[in-house]
Amino acid sequence: MPEYLTTKEVADLCRTSPETVRYWRHIGTGPVSIKPGRLVLYAAEDVRAWLEELHAEATEARTA
């Protein structure tokens, strides 16, 4: 079973606020989330993939 992170844990990892992570979820730009009931969770694997994608985009933009 994959490890899941809370909104606060994702915010801490990204060095931002939980409100920003909620905003990313609202506009559809953040990592994939699931919502069992009222709790929002993020698979650690999905968060890592999302961060790697952002890094790749930033690297590509810098070398272009």
Image (cartoon, grey):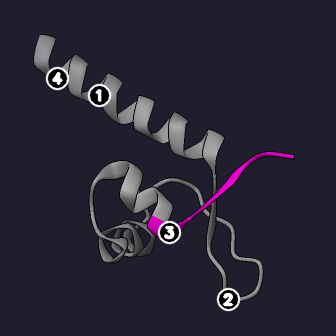
Going from N to C along the chain, the mark reached first, 1 or 2, is 2
Q: Taking 49 as reference, is 40 above or below it?
A: below
Taking the spot 53% from the left edge, 35% from the top edge, the residue there is: 49
Cα–Cα gap, marks 1 and 2: 32 Å
Q: Which residue position is annotated with label 4?
A: 61
| Disc sitting over residue 7 in the figure | 3
Identity, as a three-letter code, of the amino acid under mark 3: Thr
| Dot 2: element | loop
Cα–Cα gap, marks 4 and 1: 6 Å
| Dot 1: element | helix
Q: Which residue position is annotated with label 1?
A: 57
Is residue 29 visible from the viewing direction of this image?
no
Give left or right: position of 26 versus 43: left
Identity, as a three-letter code, of the amino acid under mark 4: Ala
| Disc sitting over residue 38 in the figure | 2
Magenta residues span 1-8
Cα–Cα gap, marks 2 and 3: 12 Å
| Dot 4: element | helix
User: Picture coordinates of residue 47 (x, y %)?
Assistant: 53, 45
Identity, as a three-letter code, of the amino acid under mark 2: Arg
Cα–Cα gap, marks 1 and 3: 23 Å
- The residue lying toward the viewer, choosing from 25 and 20, is 20
Is residue 27 visible from the viewing direction of this image?
yes
User: Picture coordinates of residue 15 (x, y %)?
Assistant: 28, 54
